Amino acid sequence: MALKRSVISAGLAAAGMLVIAQGFWIPIKAIAAQAFLNYAWVETLERGAPQKPWPWADTWPVARLTFDALGESLIVLEGANGAALAFGPGRMINSVYPNNPNTVIAGHRDTHFADLKAVKVGQLLTYQASDGSVQSFEVIDTRIVHETQTGVLEPTTEPTLTLITCYPFDAIAPGGPLRYVVRAQLDVPDYSLSSSARLARVFKEALEMSSRAQF
Amino acid sequence: MPWLSCLRCVFVCAIAVFSVVLAPFSFAATASILGEPVNAANTKAGTLLVRAEDDLVLRAVPMLGTEVDIEVAGIVARTGVTQYFHNPTDLWLEGVYVFPLPENAAVDTLEVRIGDRLIVGEIKERSEAKKIYEKAKAEGKKAALLEQERANIFTTSVAGIPPGSTVGVRIEYQRELLFRDGFFSLRFPMVVAPRYIPGDAQATSGGFGFAPDTDQVPDGSRITPRVAAPSDKILNPVKIKATINAGMTITAQSPSHLIGIDKNQDRVLITLADGVVPADRDFVLRWQPVIDQGPAMALFKERFADEDYALLMMIPPQAEAGNTQPLAREVIFVLDRSGSMAGRSFSQAKAALILALKQLRPEDAFNLIAFSSDARQLFSESMPATDANIDNALEGIARLNAEGGTEMHYALSLALENQQPTEKVRQVVFITDGAVGNEAMLFDFIKNHLGQSRLFTVGIGSAPNSHFMTDAALLGKGTYTYIGNLSEVKRQMTALFRRLESPLLTDIKIDVNGAPVETYPEHIADLYAGEPLVVLLKGKDLDQDIVVRGATGTNHWTQKVRLKNGHAHEGIARLYARRKVAAIERSLYGLADATSWREKQKAIKSEIIATGLQYQIVTKHTSLVAVEQESTVPFGENLKPWAAPINLPAGWEYGLDQSGPDTDALSQDLYYEDAAIGDATLMRASKVFAHQEHVDSSAMSVADFSSAPATVAAVTESTDWCSRYPASFACVDEKTKKDQKGGASKTQTSPPSAMQIAMGQILPRTATPAQMLLIIGMLLLITAAVIRKKKLLKWR
């Protein structure tokens, strides 16, 4: 009986250690991965083509996101799936500016995007795309939404950065239904795109104006 | 068993500690490669930053800023460039600034603004203008001089900039818009990229540049302004404002800069989104008209000194693709691998070249020439475009890196001399940034040695030498293509391939009835796909009808133009004059060996002077000079000369050796032969390229947004948040609050699946179980301890 107890005790202790190690491993991995991703990012910028951070990775750096006010910088990965999010914030596929002016980036609330709670309206975010171009975005709103409210993913008129993380920030168990959303717009007044149809009409008229009575 | 797990724990922890310890070093490594961390306030749009080591001393230095306003009406753009020379020192200065303008810009105005005073410049013969300027300087008068060094390089000199003040120099020019591949575009260059000056240095030096005057480039020191070390500060800031009077609201785009657009009733105002940008790349603005099946045309007229001038732009019918069997070709690719191409330019060039190689058909033949201080070719003669040969070329390309001089002459001689008679169409695709100073010599060579070949220039980088690109293509009876950044490679190369198929419209002639009409260009070059016909005309009274004829394959094409119907527009006469001067200059090429060359040169010079004076424009031999009436510089004060330093063009690598030509002997070795074939390298090249193609195709759909679905534009321009994001975000915020109050969500009963996340039905899940794991682990340990403690108690 006594022997059995000692075995159970040792087993529980070992399991406990293992679980704790895993608990520590997650944030450590999150921090260490960003360091390795920095290498891949530098490569990406130099070569102008996506670079995998390690050979077996199924994601790659697509942008560098800097929180100007916090002085913090993160490498954003392609895809907002669990595998990518463990290493860095992920850009949701199909939300690539400028095809879709609304770039959506998701990150873990307790690692990379833990500081999202400190982001205030009016602060600036800097977004460096993989072609090296740098754009400045101004935070215009922070909100709490339910996970089913996918409106934040929809295309916008102005180039927009939408950062998503889980809410509340200090909840212990993962998988809650609420999300914290930070929205930032390109720091440019009156920037807009127009439809091709409108363009077409405009230029047809412009050309006609310049050469009326030719036809 | 437990210690096995423990061992694993230790192992995991060790890796973790190692990673944490390593992390700062990896950041440090990153920093040393990238230089200063990117700062949004002063670096926009992809400026390459490298820390300047020597810029530690803070002191007031003269500065230069430029303000540009572009006014587009119809197909002509009039541009005002104001250069502000700011002098915070306590010395009187003479400022000198070497800057680019678009080639064929007809510059007609120079104004100097000092405080509220305005001095207006006059056109004089260049040597006379220089004398007037030097005399004014000696007499203590403020003066300004604008000289043309190349078709696209100018120098402003300003004498008598007072201490602690700013002098503004305003230059105005006009230029017709470019129209290609269905886009209107205008290009405003901002920086004279450092150029390679071949030849032997001469004792004299006429300018402030980093290169000496040489026997091949006698004005080398005038066209090579000193490049400042890259730094965090914006050097030579430029502010651009463009107004497009299109009759109604339109939208434009810029592949080079972020722009802001302000729409008005009948015009569109375009400004730089960043406010100011460093002068380190060409500003390109482009917008799209509609081309129907039939030809479109625009005609503008001006009456100048009792004569009529007209600018005619026509878009010939675009042939239907694929109805004729294209001819077999012999394509000679020439790749500039000089030091100026290092960095982003070279990856663009390689990508373009690889894309081009893959377009070759089996019946084509090709060869590859790479040049820097010398020129080498891949095969001793053109080889069939078999897979093996193309793989060989791809592998060779992967090995190339960019360094050394730019001895373009060697490359041209390899490409054009000793042409074998062939049934095939011989095309030379010349990929370069054109950063050389001996353009005239190269033009001369092309004109003499072209033979049956056609020369197609591909301009690479942020600030290519557009004068070289356009004139080399014109003399080479081909056409030019610009690639400003990697995302444009595919789009522009696709356009080039279309042009390589064959000229669309050949044997173009203008038939005039009645009174004689002078036209420039005199002999109209063949038009390639996507190119318009641009002609400038001059006549006593341009009111008759003319007929433009051409051949499209086997068909004939004619179009009647009623000159009477042109719209009045200022500046057409000067555009005509600029075209005429360019034509006169070109008439000298190909004659360098002739005995009559010197006389011919003299005749051409006086012809250019006469044209410049008649139409009051700046040419290579006529300058604008502005002089103050009274002397204002204190007596005995010596002007300290200050040559404005320039930025390194965006994407260039700092510290390249541009000092002089490499003395390496010209060799025509087969430079790949000794290299062992490495499959790994080849695979890597094609793999990287596959990525690029992927990236490019996404970029292309944006650039060519006419074909992209107009999802964005459909949204109304309301400023109301809720209507802009209907049924989403802010508008459902209240609902969320209610949900929070009510505790758990009512809408979501079952946990969302990964599928829902992937399909965008719910927002991504973004929390890790790290904390939970820690707590569970602690609980397990406590339980274990409790059990063990009980056991211990019992044993005692």
Image (cartoon, coloured by chain):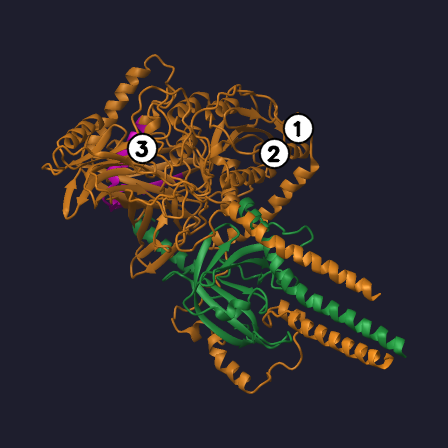
Chain colours: A green, B orange
Tell us which disc is closer to us: 3 or 1. 1
Q: Residue at x 70, y 66 (%)?
A: A22
Task: Indicate left or right for A105 with B180 as reference.
Answer: right
Tell us which disc is closer to us: 2 or 3. 2
* Chain designation of label 1: B
* Chain designation of label 2: B
At label 1, the amino acid type is Ala
On screen, residue A109 above or below B116: below
Stretch of the chain drawn in magenta: B558-584
Residue farthest to the bottom?
A: B742
Q: Which residue carries the number 2 mark?
A: B399
Is there a contact, CB below 8 Å, between mark 2 and mark 1? yes
- The span from disc 2 to disc 3 (Cα, nearest Å) is 45 Å
Q: Residues within 10 Å of mark 2 (few under 14, many from 20)?
A: few
Q: Which residue carries the number 1 mark?
A: B675
Q: Which residue carries the number 3 mark?
A: B520
* Viewer-side residue, A126 vs B71: A126
On screen, residue A159 above or below B604: below
Name the spot of residue A39 as percent of width and height, x first: 59, 50
Quadrant of the drawing holding the N terminus of chain B = bottom right
- The span from disc 3 to disc 1 (Cα, nearest Å) is 51 Å
Task: Indicate left or right for A59 with B456 as reference.
Answer: right
Count of marks, rendered view: 3
Task: Indicate left or right for B262 with A64 as reference.
Answer: left
Is there a contact, CB below 8 Å, between mark 3 and mark 1? no
Q: Is residue B513 visible?
A: no
Residue farthest to the top?
A: B595
Name the spot of residue A52 as percent of width and height, x first: 63, 51
Numbered disc 2: secondary structure:
helix
